[in-house]
Image (spheres, rainbow, N blue to C red):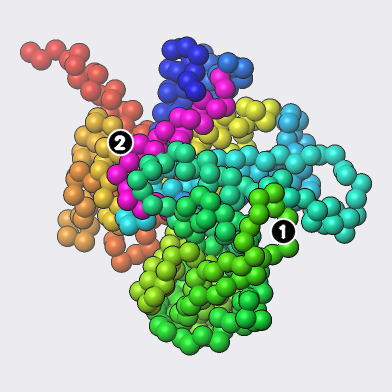
Amino acid sequence: MELPDKRLRNVLMNLVERVKKRQTLSLRRLSSSRKEEIQFGRFLSNTRVKFESLEAMLYAQCQQDAGTSRHLLLLEDSSQMAFSLQRNIEGLGKIDKGIVQGFYLHPVLTLDAHTGACHGISALEFRVRSQESDGLTYQQRKSARNKEFFEDKEAYRWRSSIETALGNLPLSASKTVVADRESDIYAVLVGLKSDLGVDYVIRSRINRPLIDGQKLYEKVLSWPVEHEFEVDLPPTDERSAHRARLQLRYGEVVMKKSEVRTKKQVPPTWSSGVVYVREVAETVVNHQKPVSWILMTSHPIPSSADALRIVDYYKQRWNVEQLFRVLKTKCLRFESSQLTQYEKLRKLMVVALMGAVKVLQLLRARDGTTQQSLAATFESDEQTFLTKLNSALEGNTQKQKNPHPNHSLAFGAWIIARLAGWSGYQSQRPPGPTDFFTGLQRFYDQYQGYLISKEISKDVLIL
């Protein structure tokens, strides 16, 4: 679906480019004049600007970028977008925190499984819960939910979003869905593989009954440790960043069907691979919980190398958390938007995601493994300016030089990170999403000066 006329398309392209370059959602800061600020606001309010048109543009960018990939990781997760109850925003709903209003966002972030390159967003779902009280107790509400079909529940998003994503991605590429514990639903595991033809790596939430009479967790604990390895873990709400030593177990189980009601008949049993990793006590920090992942997978795992690959796929799920981080308080501060209608917020979110993807592309490219070119993210004049900046940011020693080829996106990522204050030393902490967010802002501030100086130089009379 396209926008109805050329003027609206031009405003959209201008707005998207401004968000990508200025890395803000404030219409005032995105605009070069009061007239343009009003124009952007009217664009988001225009009833002729359909949400579906913006959504199609978001998916088209992902599809184009993913065109050459042979294997794609589809990372899905949900997040709350919360706004104060003191704000008068039309159309928002109740969210879990109770003292705020908002909506739920469920994107599918798409990465190349081999290189780690970020291609963009291939599916996007919004959920708004009713503000009205249903008058039921917790037990009554739970009993009512148990009688609902899975297809009518919010949890169906773990499947429906993947159906949408498949329609926006190359048919030739194989796909693996990667998701956390909330998606551990029998009908999801079965449906992804048997109905949609995609593989999955999903962290277990339920100690499922098996056909041999055992429970899942007891079964995997009985398996021998096949391998030990070390991994650098990022910080979370529950643990500090540290280097952990993990033990690896793996095998296959046959699960019994759960009691969830479905409109479509599902098989009474389902065979799935399982990879279990647990941190040894010696590397646990400050009495925090050790890492313990039980990963359900449809991929065959005949060896430790195959099991480690499943662990690597699951580790990539962290990128969707980084996406939310860029959208929220650390970077774009979406929840600080001053828009007063949910429909406007939905449109703004699509534009925000286009800007956030740019940050993630640089984040993924920083190590030089994604094989993306500088042209994937930067225009021709921007590439020229990056090369000029590189000379100014490099130091005198080899360790202070940009180590990446000047045509690669990694080359640009090194420069953007340096602009944000990163030291450039590979031995130190690598730059994170906030570094690239800040670096992009500073880059485009300087780039505007570069363009102005080019225009001035054209008008200088050389005697």
Which SS type dominates the magenta stretch?
Answer: helix
In the figure, is residue 46 to the left or right of 173? right
Q: Residue at x 43, y 12 (%)?
A: 6
Q: Position of residue 358 (x, y in %)?
A: 40, 41
In which quadrant will I find the C terminus?
top left
Q: Tell me the magenta residue range.
A: 49-73
Q: Residue at x 90, y 50 (%)?
A: 136
Q: Which residue is mark 1?
A: 260
Q: Nearer the viewer, residue 30 or 198?
A: 198
Mark 1 is on which residue type? Val
Q: Position of residue 232 (x, y in %)?
A: 42, 70
Q: Residue at x 73, y 55 (%)?
A: 261
Q: Position of residue 100 (x, y in %)?
A: 75, 44
The extreme left residue here reads 463
User: How many numbered tags mark residues here?
Assistant: 2
Q: Position of residue 78 (x, y in %)?
A: 60, 50
In this view, 337 is above or below 219: above
- Whether 68 is among the magenta residues is yes
Q: Nearer the viewer, residue 129 or 101?
A: 129
In this view, 260 is above or below 303: above
* Label 1 SS: loop
Q: Which residue is mark 2?
A: 378
Can you see residue 329?
no
Can you see residue 7?
yes
Which image quarter: residue 348? top right
